[in-house]
Image (tube, rainbow, N blue to C red):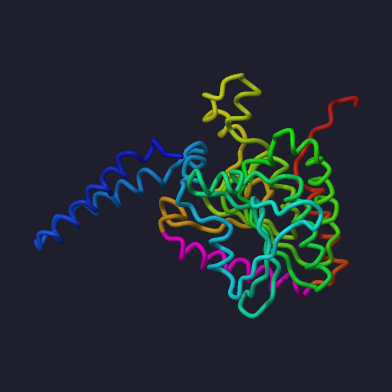
Amino acid sequence: MSTDFDKDLRELEAKIEELKSFAKAKKMEMKPEVAKLEAKAEELRRKVYGNMGAWQVVQLMRHPDRPRALDYCESVFTDWMEIHGDHMMADDKAIVTGFGNLDGRRVAVLGTQKGRDTKENLYRNFGMAQPEGYRKALRFMRLAEKFNLPIVSFIDIMGAYPGIEGEERSVAEAIARNLAEMSLFRVPIVVTVIGEGGSGGAIGIGVGDRVLMLENGFYSVISPEGCAAILWRDRGKAEQAAEALKGTAKDLLKLKIIDEVVPEPLGGAHRDPAAVAASLKAALKRHLDELCLLKPELLVAQRYAKFRAMGSYERAAGA
C-alpha cells in the first residue's frame, strides 16, 4: 500500500539516492550537497511523521517493507525452527509456528504471516488465517504447555479469512476454542501486535498475560475500511473511521488494552528493522523474566482478570 501523506519526503529521499549514485559513478565530490539535502530530509521527516493521525498510522503500518512475523522469528530468536500443520486437515501458510531461544530460554513462537508481493501474498492468503490455521496454532500451544514453554505470539492480520471455506470449516468455533484454551494455559503468554490487528482474526491468537504493540501498529475490532462501509456505506470514509476506532498504540495504552508500546524509528519499522528487533527482544525478555517467576495458578487468574477488566460501560438510570 503506497502512502500519500509522505509523498514529498519519499521524492526527496529518492533524489538524494540519485545524487549519491551520480557522484559515485562520476567520481565527484558532492558530500556538501548531499549533507544539505539530508538535513532537509530529516527536518521534513520529523514534520511528516512526528504528528500522524490514525489514518496515517494505518497507511504506514501497511508499508510493504514492514517486517513480518517470520522476520522477527529469525531476528529476535536464535535456533529458530518452524513446525507445520494442524494434524487434522492442512498447513495454513497464514499462521507460522515454531521454537526458538530467547537469550537461552526456549520459547514457543507463533504468528500471522503476510506477504510482501502478489506471489507471496497469494501463498500466505494475504495473512488471513483459515480455521485450520487457528487449529494449528492451538495444537502448537498445547504442545508448548506440555513441555512448559512460554508462548510468544505475533499479530499482523486484517481479519480471519471471510470466504465460504472458512464458514464451512467453522472459523468462529476455531477462534472461540482458542480464546477459551488460551485463557487457561498454565504457561506465560506474551502477545505483540507487530502490524495490523483486526477483529477476531487477531484475538484468536491474542489472549496473553502481557499484550505489547509496536508504535505504528493498529489494533481494532474491524478495519477502518470495513467500519466505514458498515456505518456510512462508504469505504472512502476510512480516515474518519480510523480516528473513531481508537486503534493506535497510543490510544490503546491509554485505554489499558495493551501493556507497553515498543518504539519504532521515525518513519516506521522498515527504516531500521534491526533496531526494532532489538527493542522488541528486550521487551519480550523483560516480560518473560517477570512472568516465569509466577505460579501457574496465579498466571491464569491474572490473565482472566486482565481481559475481564477491559472496556467500560454505564448503567442507565432505573436499569
Q: Residue at x 74, y 52 (%)?
A: 90
List the single residue furthest toward the bottom: 104
List the single residue furthest toward the right: 318
Name which quarter of the figure residue 140 lies in. Answer: bottom right
The magenta-colored residue range is 272-293
Find residue 56 and report its horizontal and vertical position in percent.
47, 39
Q: Please, is residue 134 above or below residue 279 in the view?
A: above
Q: Is residue 243 magenta?
A: no
Q: Is residue 60 rendered to the left or right of residue 157? A: left
Q: Nearer the viewer, residue 309 or 267?
A: 267
Quarter of the figure that contains the C terminus: top right
Q: Nearer the viewer, residue 229 or 43?
A: 229
Q: Nearer the viewer, residue 17 or 239?
A: 17
How many numbered marks appear? 0
Q: Residue at x 61, y 38 (%)?
A: 246
Q: Residue at x 84, y 70 (%)?
A: 146
Q: Is residue 107 rendered to the left or right of residue 1? A: right
List the single residue furthest toward the front: 89
Please name the predominant secondary structure of the magenta segment in the image: helix
Find residue 145 and report its horizontal and vertical position in percent.
81, 68
Find residue 126 and report its horizontal and vertical position in percent.
59, 44
Find residue 117 and report its horizontal and vertical position in percent.
48, 46
Q: Please, is residue 21 above or below residue 229 in the view?
A: below
Name which quarter of the figure residue 34 lies in. Answer: bottom left
Q: Is residue 291 magenta?
A: yes
Q: Residue at x 84, y 49 (%)?
A: 177
